[in-house]
Image (tube, grey):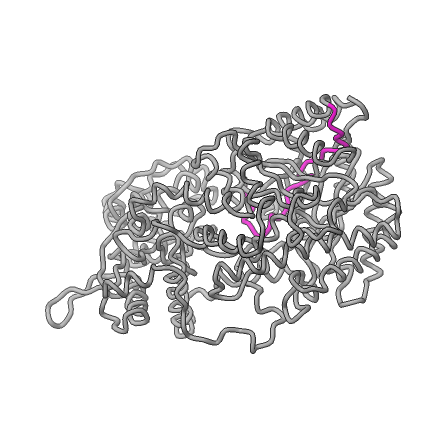
Amino acid sequence: MGESIRFGVATADHQCEAYDGHDDVRDVWERVRGLVPRGRATDFWNRYREDVELARSLGCTIFRLSLSWARLEPEVGRYDDDAFTHYRDVLKAIRDAGMQSVVTLVHNTWPLHVQTAGNGAGLLDAQFPQRMAAYADVVAERLGDLIDYYVTLNEPNQLVYGWIRGFWMRSYAMPPGQPPYMPADRQMDDVLTLIPNLFRAHARSRDAIKRRRPAASVGANPLVLGLPRWLQRLVDRNATHVTSPEQIRKRASRLAQSWLLEGGRVDCSIAQITMTAERETAALFSEPYYAGRLCVLRAASQPLPEERSQWRGRIGVASDMLPARLAASLFPAATPRYFANAADAVAALHAGALDAVLDDDVVLEPFAHETLALDVLPVPEQRFAVAMAFGSRTLLNVVDRVLRDLKRERPDLPREANRKTLADLGRSPDDASASDDVPEMERSVARIRARGVLRVGVHPGVPGLCELSAAPDGSVRYTGLEPEIAHRIAERLLGDRNRVEFLPLHGDKRFKATRSWLQAIFSLRKTLAIFGTLLGTNWWNLGMAGKLPGFLCPADCVGSLDYVGLDYYWGVPSFWPTELHRLSAAAEFKYASAPVWPSALEMILREAAGDFPGKPIVVIENGCVTEADGFTRAAYLEAHVREVRRAAQRGVPVAAYLCWSITSNREWGLAFDDNSDFGLFHIGLDDDPTLARVPTDASAHYAKLIAQER
């Protein structure tokens, strides 16, 4: 097998270090987008010795951490001696524990002064490579004697999603995002600026490091997907055979145009629809217009026990509504009963056939009185949003504009705008679009105007949100916040607030009615959009191997690596569009739904060895949430470590394998749950003030796998 593979673990600065009051780009991104802030995170800044010791106890011989550029260089050209001293102590602890170090310079975030440079150009600015190289030079000078491997840019091929988004995406996946109404061709123009800038930043940083530390080992870690190899080669032709930037711009339309997916029974649905990860796979959602709270209505004389999980009462829910799906997790020992609507459930409560009713506060508050009490559950608020068909980007922009105008009049409505970006950070006011016009980006609005009426799905019967009322002339009309939103959309689109046709909807039909029957081809359309463009390729390693045209990877950047780094998590062995579509779950942060294909890792490692002969290979990241695609974290690690060893037995020079991650961490603004917990050691980030590191079956199993290498 040759030299033994080093096994290790990893952390990252923003995900693990407590917020210290000094923003990086991700702190601002999480704030403006209404995401979960890192807060104390895992407090790795103060508890690094504990985590290093945990890694040593597993048998690890290599440890990865990421440096906070924002801490090290809080202002342009001013470096913080205390921060460097701290990281030196961390690296010394790693060395004293008998482990090599892997240090990431830029781990998906950067200082605000870097983002605001060049009038807000940030990473697109022509001077960004020099700025990063200057930072790398100081790191190499002050810390380089304790660093074994450098990672310049974490997953550089994923950074492009801060500048481009597909027709199915409500917002940009990563910071900084683009200004409003940015068309696809201009988004791709920025991507064509970003990609060579990232190559230059890496190469210039490597040069700076090597001048200080000639023996340094410098690379990067693109995220590689597992695809059938014939399909991967076909996909890579999108990058290797491209002849001009214009050719790439034309292909960008595949990402932007929804193509036959528009048009259902309604143009949009404003019907108390709570945004969830599952529903975002079925419709496009606006910013929230209402924040509901889950509540339990019960007899005032019979309070619920403090421990909900043990309560064995009878609980009523309205079928086909979100609370019905949440009841089992909120009250696992209770007996649920299903009703056509909340009013019927409340009638059963009055009759003694139920012990409680579960629904949103706006639904249950009218029923609360002296004999019935309402308890607000300690769970996140339910954000109601307008649903529409995928690809309806123009309509989405109109709806969001209407909602923002309405929120200025109604301070009681949710303030957050969850499609905000950092695009205006550092830009002069003259660069911001002050126009009140919403440009046409596809045909969603044109179809409504041609028809002359806006079709809106509603869910009547909820006071304040949507009710049926008798007009003075004897007719019946819809009133409440949701119909008012519909009237305002009609006013903006058609110049007449009354040109609205309301359609009562219930259950899942509330958002499914936005979709046409052609939604059945969505998986195919989305697959073509992703894998039919440059973005579906492994363009980073293609560039390093000299297989990209010079306008993507400058000639002086080719081969600028001392080892081949890669991240691998997910893959599919089948080329069917429905299977390829599953890969997008990871890109949308639905990690528990992502497909697992361990065998692809061995193939990827063999191909990397062929593309970069003589270069050692390091698996910088590989790991799993609590469970994904039927794999527990322990089973996932065993399957992938087996593939790494198989590759090594076939002569692939695998130097190291690192598991992501040593502990639970704050995974990029996500709610902390089984979908975002990659930790070998579990930390109750939301409910344990001590942040205790608790061993898991996976940590014990990983230790056994490491022991087999000895």
Quadrant including the N terminus: top right
Image coordinates for residue 32, horizontal then vertical, percent: 55, 63
| Vertical position of residue 643 compared to residue 81: above or below | above
619 relative to 401 in the view: left or right: right
Magenta segment: 651-673
Q: Is residue 145 visible?
A: yes
In the rendered structure, the answer to whether residue 643 lies left or right of residue 391 reads right
Location of residue 232 (image quadrant)? top right
Q: Main secondary structure of the magenta part?
A: loop
User: Is 284 on the left-hand or right-hand side of 458?
Assistant: right
Residue 368: image x %, image y %?
31, 56
Q: Position of residue 351 (x, y in %)?
A: 23, 44
Side of 671 relative to 514 (left or right) = right
List the single residue furthest toward the bottom. Answer: 430
Residue nearest the observer in this picture, 89 or 605: 605
Whether residue 494 is in magenta: the answer is: no
- Residue 663 part of the magenta-drawn span: yes
Image quadrant for the C terminus?
Answer: top right
Q: Residue drawn 32% across and 71% down?
A: 492
Q: Nearer the viewer, residue 452 or 474?
A: 452
